Image: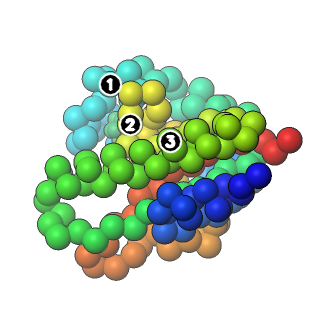
Amino acid sequence: MKSLEMIAEELGFSDTSSTPTYQIKFVPEYRKYCEDNVCGNYDKLPTCPPGCGTFEQLRDKVMAYETAFVMKTLWTVEDFQDSKAFKEMKFQHNKITKELVRQAGEQGLVGHMITAGPTADTSCISAYCIDVSELAKTCNMEYFCGDNKVAFFSVFCYTAK
Ligand code: SF4
């Protein structure tokens, strides 16, 4: 049986770590950032607020599991105004997140997936109001990665058998 860390390394994540879900810091006020709709997805995508559920409902989905496996990819950015490039980075990040969860499922480990930005069937980490910088700190992962770098984070919540 492959560990999640081994699968993640094969898939190309730059860093991973685990933490008990009770250590995740949720900030309900972060829903305001969704409502500001800078991303343009608010009340448009079913996996975004308000359609994806209340903050409490999403928090409960996380807290239904014991452990959060946190995955990070690190990217070099040529132009921070290039939204198309950011979209592609998130797409690739979420693609390997889904592949990790698929492989975990093959090993009988099922749980709840949170992606870096919304997909057709998963919600963005922002929808959960998770304080990602605190999560990174809890996990001993770098959150700020340098001037021309950006990191994306996703989470797989599960309970070991
Ligand atoms: S969950 Fe993410 S993509 Fe959806 S509205 Fe909030 S910030 Fe935008």
Q: Secondary structure at mark 1?
A: loop
Q: Quadrant of the C terminus?
A: top right
Q: Earlier in the sequence, mark 1 or mark 3?
A: 1
* Label 1 residue near ligand 1, CB within 8 Å: yes
| Residue carrying label 3 | 98
N-terminal-most mark, 3 or 2 = 3
Residue 35 in view of the camera: yes
Q: Is residue 30 visible?
A: no
Mark 2, Cα crowd under 10 Å, few <14 / some 14-19 / many 20+, is many
Give the residue at x 25% y 54%: 86
CB under 8 Å between callouts 1 and 2?
yes
Beta carbon of the mark 2 residue lies under 8 A of ligand 1: yes
Residue located farthest toward the bottom when viewing the structure as drawn: 146
Residue 91: give x, y in percent of width and height. 33, 46
Indicate the amino acid at tag 2. Pro
Q: Residue furthest right?
A: 161
Mark 3 near ligand 1 (CB under 8 Å)? no
Q: Which residue is mark 1?
A: 45
Instruction: Tell me how far mark 1 sits from mark 2, CA to CA.
Output: 8 Å
Residue 119 at x, y = what percent?
Answer: 38, 34
Residue occupying the point 14% across, 66% down: 79
Q: Which residue is mark 2?
A: 118
- Disc 2 on helix, strand or loop? loop
- Residue type at numbered disc 3: Lys
Depth check, front residue: 85 or 127: 85
Picture residue at 62% right of the left edge, 73% below the top: 140
- Residues under labels 3 and 2: Cα distance? 12 Å
**Quadrant location of residue 31?**
top left
Up/down of 131 relative to 148, above or below = above
Q: Nearer the viewer, mark 1 or mark 3?
A: 3
C-alpha distance separating marks 1 and 3: 19 Å
Instruction: Say which of 105 and 24 sits in front.
Output: 105
